[in-house]
Amino acid sequence: MTSLSQQRLFTRDYLLGFVVLIGSYIVFIALMTFMALYAAQRFSTNDTAAGFAASSFVVGAGLVRLVIGKYLDFIGRKRTLVLALTVFVLCSVLYPFANHFVLLIVIRVVQGTAFGVISTAVTSAVLDIIPPSRRSEGLGFFSLAATLGTAIGPFAAVRLTQVASDGSVFIFTAICAAVSLLAVLPMRIEEHPPSDEEYAERWRIRGSDLLDAKALPVAVVAFISAIGYSLIMTFLSPYLVGRGQAEAASSFFMVFALAMLAVRLFAGRVQDRYGENAVIPAGLVSMALSLLTIGLADSLWLIVLAAVLGGIGQGVAVPGLQAVGINRTSPNRIPIATSTHYLALDTGIAIGPVALGFMIPLAGYPGLYFLGTGVVVIGVIVYWVAHGRHAAR
């Protein structure tokens, strides 16, 4: 192989991995956006239970992230991806047949578990494909799969419910899941058989295998930020649809994703040059302002403004906090620090709708978003106390 070919980034297997991730994320975000409204209409649940129907997906993803990193190579990376994607497709097909709320939750948790395995395993596989000299660039482009999924998923879910039916959303997500499964089948994945020492300790799990103590303080901030994000993803559609603004809901998610995509093109460069305090507090404040604007919105232009602010906040805060967590730990602990970050995000998305959903019957959706604003402002304070004031020095 020539030196040039060894440095190629957009190889066949890299692009197949991108397809796997974007298909999985479309399913995740589309159903996250759609599920609260579906559960409320299909099973006549209250707002808190409807919120859990959406966020229970992330419960499964969060739990499996605790252990999949340790056991991925014992099972085999290709085998793990094929099995997890098969379960992912089956769950997508089963949704229309769930005739009881508890059964719906079971399917959500199982599919969320499969998603946690898929996202971890395919990222690990792609890390082996990316040339070391282009790792940051390769991971940056690869992460766009999640951003595009955030744009396509909610937009498709809202539009399909407008022009077709609830069943069409499930057909769409089942097709996306099937595309991800088909993409992984021809993908060449490097395996990493465990060493004799790793095999001998395969059943031993310590706290340090699950969480990184040095990354934990900023992971708490990521958890708080994810609560605000979860209120947008879970309750914005039923809020706007209930006000007869379904078009505004679809527009919001598209603008949100575009703003997030745009800010990610330069936010990391600014953080590298001027430090994390130059971007992360601003990102958190932008997220708080987005929630406040949603609570106050009485026109389409305010909804669009909230989408821009939310996209900027999410696009700046999440990768920025991840970078800080990795920088705080030692090189050999980077995988655990990364897992700690994602677990914090998953937990925030899972807990947010359930913990704060009680505000809807008390003060309506505006009250919910005002409370969410306060929660994210607390995140700014926690960031400053836990990390920012030390970074400033």
Image (cartoon, helix red, strand yellow):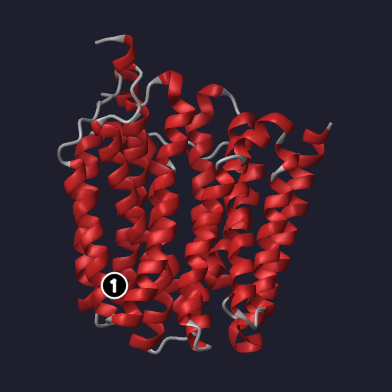
Residue 341: % across, % down: 54, 44
Q: Quadrant of the C terminus?
A: top right
Image point (63%, 77%), residue name = 368
Quadrant hosting residue 54:
bottom left
**Local crowd size for mark 1, using a 10 Å CA cut-off: few (<14), some (14–19), many (≥20):** many
Out of 338 and 284, give the one closest to the viewer. Answer: 284
**Quadrant in the picture for the N terminus:** top left
Q: Is residue 119 left or right of residue 139?
A: left
Is residue 121 visible to us here?
yes
Q: How many marks?
A: 1
Kindly identify the residue that appears in the image at 58 percent across and 65 percent down: 307
Image position of 285 (left or right of 322) = right
Q: Is residue 280 above or below residue 359?
A: above
The residue under label 1 is 169
Task: Examine the rendered structure and indicate whether residue 278 appears above or below residue 105.
Answer: above
**Residue at 69% of width from left, 63% of height from top?**
288
Tell me the kind of residue under disc 1.
Answer: Val
Where is residue 97 drawn, in percent x and y?
20, 77
Asked if residue 316 is positioned above or below residue 178 in the image, the reply reads: above
Point 69% across, 79% down: residue: 296
Quadrant in which residue 362 is drawn: bottom right
- For the question of whether residue 207 can be seen, the reply is no
Q: Nearer the viewer, residue 99 or 236?
A: 236
Residue 163 in the image, given as x and y percentages of width and height: 31, 81
Helix, strand or loop under label 1: helix
Location of residue 261 in the rendering, given as x and y in whole percent from the top left corner: 51, 49
Q: Quick one: which residue is furthest to the front in this view?
A: 301
